[in-house]
Amino acid sequence: MDRILVTGGAGFIGSNFVHHVVATTDAHVTVLDKLTYAATQESLEGLPDDRVTLVIGDIAEPEVVEPLVADVDAVVHYAAESHNDNSLSDPGPFIRTNVVGTFTLLEAARKHDKRFHHVSTDEVYGDLELDDPKRFTEDTPYNPSSPYSASKAGSDHLVRAWVRSFGVRATISNCSNNYGPWQHIEKFIPRQITEVIDGRRPRVYGDGLNVRDWIHTEDHSSAVLAILERGRIGETYLIGADGEKNNLEVVQAILRHFGRGDDDIEFVRDRAGHDRRYAIESGKLRQELDWRPQYQDFDAGLEATIEWYVANEAWWRPHKDAVEAAYAAKGQ
Ligand code: NAD
Ligand code: TDX
């Protein structure tokens, strides 16, 4: 593949994928990104101009999307509204970007017969009980809980239908919770690291026993590239790194890093519809495509991520100021 269009390539995970493609292939990358509040454009700085081109635009606008899709060999689709809490307070942008935006890209991929990879989430499967012996697999029925996960489920169904009805050469990946550098401070791990840096107590929703299956964003990128290059058309692959932790375990590791007590936590009102546990069985990806995560040790990956946030306050501080002002206005 000589030319790849990466939607949402200025965001947390998409920008990591752009770096991964530049470092491990000869492909040219065009990034299509609307540069919403969530974009981390600084993460693309330093990449060679002859390998990466940034186009600022909306994936839900056909006149923006079509010429870009026509000009590449493959589309890797990351762009989304991605934060559950935002989807509870204002679902509209999630439907427009995640559903209409994916539809718009699929229509362009169909018209120009392009390879399409759709980046989705494990949240489309709903949640598991804490003691459920099963984990999510590619055969788990869809059962989304929030407007965000319902919009991602909708986008997955569109991709499946465009494969079956129109023969679009698409694959889907559903990944678990990512962590690493450049994650927006609205998300759990960066929010809590920056709260503790500011001398405040981490704000944990409900009882803090909700479990997330953490994966480093670099491992997500290597998995997506493997699927793009070697995945079977029409197939779904779950991506995970066996990183189950409950939220208390994560904030306690952050508190310990800064020499604070394990119980220095503020328990706050629970998120509406809060999913209890996500857990990924990624055997299909590992066996078919011989993929393995490089970050096997969550504690070491978290330590490195904490140190990255300590060193990069100039980047996250304006985002934090903006988010905290919005939360204060909403009483969150
Ligand atoms: P993010 O919010 O950090 O980045 C999203 C990017 O998409 C931003 O750069 C934003 O400007 C761009 N964007 C939003 N609306 C757009 C539009 N209409 N047109 C063009 N660009 C637009 O999100 P992220 O955490 O990097 O997630 C990327 C993808 O990975 C999403 O599809 C998400 O559902 C999926 N995913 C995320 C996680 C996670 O843990 N964060 C886990 C599994 C899957
Ligand atoms: O302040 C907080 N306190 C808290 O207890 C925040 C922001 C979150 N939480 C809890 C809620 C979840 O149990 O932490 C957990 C993780 O929350 P988020 O970072 O908001 O992630 P989550 O809702 O699990 O969704 C994430 O993973 C799947 C991404 O945001 C999605 O884009 C991805 O699809």
Image (cartoon, rainbow, N blue to C red):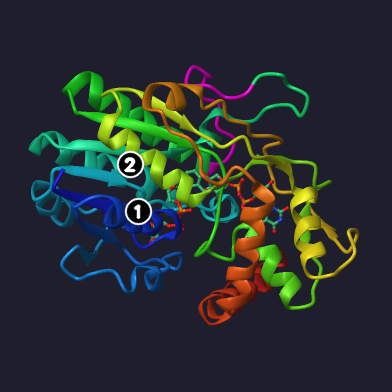
- Horizontal side of residue 212 vs 282, given as left or right: right
Disc 2 under 8 Å from ligand 1? The reply is: no
> Neighbour class for label 1 at 10 Å: few (<14), some, many (≥20)?
some
Q: Which residue is mark 2?
A: 225
Q: Amino acid at mark 1?
A: His
Q: Amino acid at mark 2?
A: Leu
Q: Nearer the viewer, residue 161 or 130?
A: 130
Looking at the image, residue 272 lies above or below residue 144: below
Q: Quadrant of residue 310?
A: bottom right
Looking at the image, residue 115 lies above or below residue 164: below
Give the image location of residue 236, x and y in percent. Answer: 38, 26
Question: Do labels 1 and 2 touch, CB within 8 Å?
Answer: yes
Q: Nearer the viewer, residue 279 or 33?
A: 279
Residue numbers of the magenta segment = 135-147
Give the image location of residue 324, x and y in percent. Answer: 64, 73
Asked if the stretch drawn in magenta spans residue 217, the answer is no
Q: Residue visible at 91% across and 59% down? A: 263
Disc 1 under 8 Å from ligand 1? The reply is: no
- Horizontal side of residue 170 vs 185, given as left or right: left
Asked if the stretch drawn in magenta spans residue 146, the answer is yes
The main secondary structure of the magenta stretch is: loop
- Horizontal side of residue 103 vs 275, given as left or right: left
Identify the mark at residue 295; answer none if there is no mark: none
Looking at the image, residue 203 lies above or below residue 17: below
In what quadrant of the picture does the C terminus appear?
bottom right
Q: Residue visible at 25% across and 59% down? A: 31
Q: Residue visible at 54% across and 80% down? A: 318
Gap in angstroms between the C-alphas marked 1 and 2? 8 Å
First in sequence: mark 1 vs mark 2: 1
Q: Which residue is mark 1?
A: 20
